[in-house]
């Protein structure tokens, strides 16, 4: 279970592309949450003992953040930013690009090497759930993050969800928040090569995670827009619109990768 306290796409729309350096919205509260995380602490100590980069070092290097500079935060060198990042988000239709993606379902593209050819970056896509202790219903969502493919991917999947849980991610939509929701738990993850989020439709992994998110919503009772009252899940709207022209492809890609969690519910 993920005990860290950061794409829940909806039929209303998804957000636009941003560069890797601007992907995380940083605020001082992250440092406190990360330092208080037993899981992150254990991974960091283990890496430090082995003389390797810690998870915090990896995050700082790739996102231009300063999680590891505790004294800098104390001295106020790194100002907080508003979590919603409304000024940096560009709206785009959920149906996706007009032409077919380059990568077919079933195989993820190769990740691009960086300049020194020693490290490889890619994008990890993750589905997750959050349980509402008052209603006993689940919220299902997805997120993504640029990752180092030479590092353990399972931990980076947990880290991506932790970042999603802690602060609003600039390329995601709003999700339920509050003390009534337990911390997010990782469901499945997959890896592609879209360093630029705007190129995600070229990632077969993105197709699969979109289909998985919708199957996860349906598995937990369906979106409120589908079922009406009494509600069965905390998802107000679907992850993939019923009339989304890519819907069946998303569903088929996810089913091929993880098996069918729930039958297709689109048109």
Image (cartoon, rainbow, N blue to C red):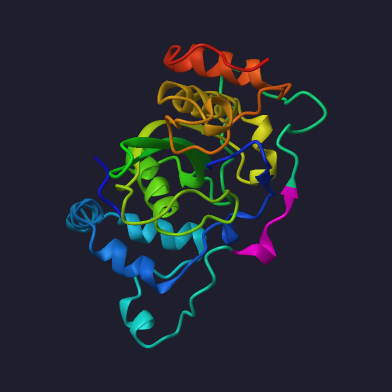
Q: Is residue 102 left or right of residue 112?
A: right
Q: Identify whether 204 is placed above or below 249.
A: below
Whether 240 is drawn above or below 181: the answer is above
Residue 56: in magenta span = no
Q: Quadrant of the N terminus?
A: top left
Q: In percent of the image, x 54 and y 29: which residue is there?
A: 228
Q: Residue at x 46, y 67 (%)?
A: 65
| Residue 156 as seen in the image, left or right of residue 243 | left
Q: From the viewer's perspective, is 228 left or right of 186?
A: right
Q: Which residues are magenta?
A: 85-91
| x, y percent for residue 69 | 35, 75
Q: Residue furthest right?
A: 98
Q: How many marks?
A: 0
Vertical position of residue 261 compared to residue 216: above or below: above
**Residue 83 visible in the current orientation:** yes
Image quarter of residue 33: bottom left
At which x and y percent is residue 14?
66, 43
- Which residue sits at x=45%, y=84%? 77
Place of residue 22 in the rendered image (x, y in percent of width and height, measured from the top left)? 59, 61
Residue 52's quadrant in the figure? bottom left
Q: Is residue 118 something one can see in this rendering?
A: no
Q: Nearer the viewer, residue 108 or 25?
A: 25
Of the 4 image quadrants, the one containing the C terminus is top right
Nearer to the camera, 49 or 230: 230
Give the x, y percent position of residue 194.
62, 39
Q: Is residue 87 magenta?
A: yes
Work out which residue is located at the far front of the displayed protein and give it. 229
């Amino acid at each position: 279970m993920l005990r860290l306290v950061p794409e829940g796409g909806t039929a209303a729309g998804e957000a636009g592309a941003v560069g890797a350096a601007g992907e995380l919205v940083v605020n001082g509260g992250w440092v406190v949450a990360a330092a208080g995380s037993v899981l992150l602490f254990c991974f960091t100590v283990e890496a430090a003992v082995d003389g390797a980069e810690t998870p915090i070092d990896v995050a700082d290097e790739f996102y231009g953040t300063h999680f590891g500079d505790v004294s800098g935060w104390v001295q106020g060198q790194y100002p907080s930013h508003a979590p919603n990042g409304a000024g940096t988000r560009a709206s785009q239709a959920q149906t996706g690009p007009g032409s077919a993606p380059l990568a077919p379902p079933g195989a993820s593209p190769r990740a691009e090497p960086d300049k020194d050819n020693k490290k490889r970056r890619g994008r990890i896509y993750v589905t997750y759930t959050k349980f509402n202790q008052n209603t006993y219903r689940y919220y299902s969502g997805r997120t993504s993050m640029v990752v180092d493919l030479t590092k353990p991917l399972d931990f980076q999947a947990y880290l991506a969800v932790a970042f999603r849980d802690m602060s609003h991610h600039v390329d995601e939509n709003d999700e339920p928040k509050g003390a009534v929701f337990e911390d997010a738990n990782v469901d499945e993850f997959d890896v592609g090569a879209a360093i630029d989020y705007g190129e995600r439709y070229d990632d077969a992994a993105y197709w699969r995670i979109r289909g998985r998110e919708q199957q996860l919503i349906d598995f937990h009772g369906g979106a409120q827009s589908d079922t009406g009252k009494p509600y069965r899940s905390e998802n107000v709207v679907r992850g993939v619109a019923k009339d989304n022209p890519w819907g069946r492809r998303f569903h088929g890609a996810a089913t091929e990768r993880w098996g069918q969690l729930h039958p297709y519910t689109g048109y």
